Image (tube, rainbow, N blue to C red):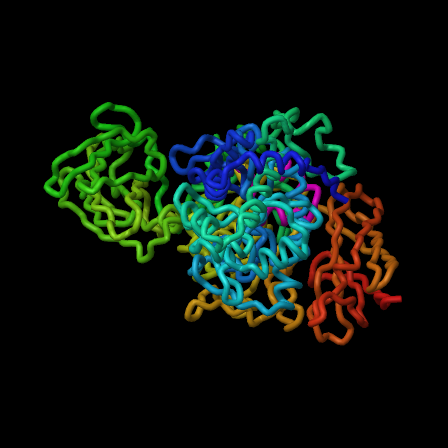
Amino acid sequence: MTRRQTVDEADLTRRLDAMSLKEKVTLLTGGDAWTLTPVVAAGLASLALSDGPVGPRGTTFGDNAAPALLFPSPSSLSAAWDEDTAYEAGRLMGLKAREMGIHVLLAPTVNLHRSPLGGRHFECYSEDPHLTARTTVGFVKGVQSTGVAATVKHFVGNDSETQRMTYDARIDEKTLRETYLPPFEAAVKEAGAWVVMAAYNSVNGTSMTENGELLNGLLKEEWGFDGVVVSDWQATNSTEASALAGLDLVMPGPDGPWGDALLAAVEKGRIAEAVIDDKVRRILRLAARVGALNGVEAMHGVDDTDSTADAAGADAAPVPQDVRSRIRDLAVRGSVLLRNNGLLPLQTDTLRKVALIGPNAVRFTAQGGGSAHVTPEHVVTPLEGLRRALGDEVEITVRQGAFPHATLLPLDGNTATDPVTGEPGVRLEYRTADGTVLSEEHKDPATTWFPVLLADEVAELAVRTRLTLQEPGIHRLSVLGPGHITLHVPGHEPQTHEQLQDNDDIASLVLYPPTHTFAFPADRGETEILVSFRPQRHLPYPIALLGLGYDTPRGTDDEELEAAVAAATEADAVIVVVGSDAHTEAESVDRTTLVLRGRQDELVERVCAANPRTAVVVNAGSPFLLPWADRPAALLWSWFPGQEGGDAIADILTGTEPGGRLPTTFPAAEADVPVLSTQPVDGTLDYTEGDLIGHRAYTASGTAPLFPFGHGLSYTTWDYQDFVVTGDLGRGLTVRVTIRNTGERPGREVVQAYLDPVDGDEPQRLIGFAAVEANASESVTATITVPAQALTVWTSAGWAPRSGPYRLRVGRSAADLRLTAAVPRSS
């Protein structure tokens, strides 16, 4: 049970009564993009909100963002299959948020992996509602144990990105109740979440910010949610409809559809002031919980039995000094060993030469793209991790092998200097149509994109920088942002390109801007370049987005492949790191294929043929096709593992137990995927598959995936010996499973329990799991508690117990179930 710390409601009433109607209404729209307007009369400080799911970023974005902690992606966190691990991640993020002055963390994202092509797949937990719910409960409790609010998002049906701000998700009530709502319900009713975010999309014809049936009727009345419903950023498009539906807070601000229009609606009697008071009370209640009311300390939302929470108060607990080692451990717990023919763990005492090969070995991806992005102080690469793990006596040869990336790395201060000041960075000039320079400024550092405010008279932006070129050959420069671009390089004809954004989604512009790469020959030394940029002006915002990327000369793909094969041939062991990047997997855009970009498949095939002692690490946040999966001696899935990812990978390769199990099914072919398309038809996304997504659909159809839901190997072996089931379908079940570690070293196993209908008229479903550890030759009992609610079915009359007959199956994955027993019917 969650210990519900109560708020002094009488005190909230006194503060509410002290506010004018104008102050109340003003509070209901953000004061700016990330904070709320303080109210002196109510003793209310400004509340600060921050993304996100991989760690708090703070209240700035882009090149001005302060260094933060970068945690493993949520898909990695759920791969640990452990509520305590989720709690640990949430608690560490909450502590960091408090240190940064953040009151509300915009996480977790609990939408489902409906399609593996979903752009934010990496930011969501699982294809399964039960695994998602348990991970969510642990994470929310962890965050709120620090006195920081967790924000459960995106409520609801926001399971893909294509036309994300406008599509209508058509979901029948049974599917909605049994599949897509359980993670939100668990967050509210079990974890006591303090904030829920209403999504951009519509559900069954009504925008979620105007969906009174789901916001007022389900969330607030049926579930008893007493927190704040905040809109996704720019998701609110009405005044009265959204205000009456149950939305409490419009973000961002200060502009928006409420403000003066909402004030007028109250004054004219179209909206009762009591509706406004309820919203303000909820925000005051949130402020009390997070310590933003004068005289009220921040609260805990912790479990009664939790011994890790600081009983002295949230303010007393600092971020642990060993937080980076804890993030590293989280990445290890989420990494999934998919295959191993005995190569791993590496016998380090026999290694003299190791080849580290692959595009993600050179350009490691620690996180996906979008609003969840944070700027870490550092990211440990696989090379750094292996160097520490193997020692200086082992020779490590690095070869890229292929270049699949759609974008170049950001221009850095070692390569680019301002030609006027000589400082690292670039010189930005604001010009009129005839080329007159109106003003100019230095941009430092030149490590990412920067937004530019455009005055009416500005027709062109000019970026000048002096490049220090380390070697002769074909150099590449990319320009990011929509508009008409001309690249001027001394001694060469100007190159031009036009790239436009075809919609007015500001989030899409910021999160997934168009980019173009120019190529030019140059010798070693210094050269000054000029980029003339005429920004696209039809967008309804007076801003331009501009950024530069650069890449040194490299061989052709054929030459890079040959060099990689040669290095593999000479090595005692080979580590190949392939995968995706933050451009391929990003908010605001869905993928169009499950195929790895470029020639990565060919690279793996050729390297494995050259050296059978090859381990492949896939650095990706969501499933890809692996046509070569049976070729390497070992296959490890690292996800986007956060800032300590390189060390975590090296730990596993050299002997640390890999802790993860797949939270989503990996298909053998795109044709096998139950739900692949994320494309709305005439603005509608029909969930016609019902609850047949992920592993449920695979087991129902008999289709064999490449790797099943729940799959993951240990460095030891396990024997499932016995299990006992008590209880029944009406009262709930207690499942005790005895397993034995039959290997020669300690290990961790995740015991999974699935409810399987005997007559086969509904899909097999996960109803419980437990992670256990055991020493070599030791037996251990895993206990799985299944509450009665988890055994109910939604009917036209509401929730009802399942009637059966059912059997309970337990094992290592959805496709490897080793013990079976009948489930008693309701007594």
State the image quarter where residue 140 is shown: top right
Q: Is residue 319 magenta?
A: no
**Which residue is at 72% across, 61% downward?**
816
Q: How many marks?
A: 0
Relative vertical location of residue 539 with respect to residue 441 in this rendering, above or below: below
Indicate the quadrant containing the N terminus: top left, top right, bottom left or bottom right. Answer: top right
Relative placement, left or right, of 592 versus 788 is left
Q: Position of residue 248 (x, y in %)?
A: 53, 48
Q: Residue furthest left?
A: 434
Q: Which residues are magenta?
A: 70-94
Q: Position of residue 319 (x, y in %)?
A: 61, 28
Q: Main secondary structure of the magenta part?
A: helix
Q: Position of residue 400 (x, y in %)?
A: 42, 44
**Which residue is at 47% across, 47% downward?**
250
Residue 587 seen in this snapshot = no
State the image quarter where residue 729 is shown: bottom right
Q: Position of residue 93 (x, y in %)?
A: 59, 36
**Which residue is at 65% across, 55% downward?**
221
**Which residue is at 73% across, 65% downward?**
799
Q: Is residue 76 magenta?
A: yes
State the image quarter where residue 138 is shown: top right
Relative vertical location of residue 487 with respect to residue 501 in this rendering, above or below: above
Residue 502 seen in this snapshot = yes
Relative placement, left or right, of 503 versus 733 is left
Relative vertical location of residue 627 with respect to residue 449 in this rendering, above or below: below
Indicate the quadrant containing the C terminus: top left, top right, bottom left or bottom right. Answer: bottom right
Question: Which sits in the foreground, 560 or 822?
Answer: 822
Question: Which sits in the foreground, 454 or 569?
Answer: 454
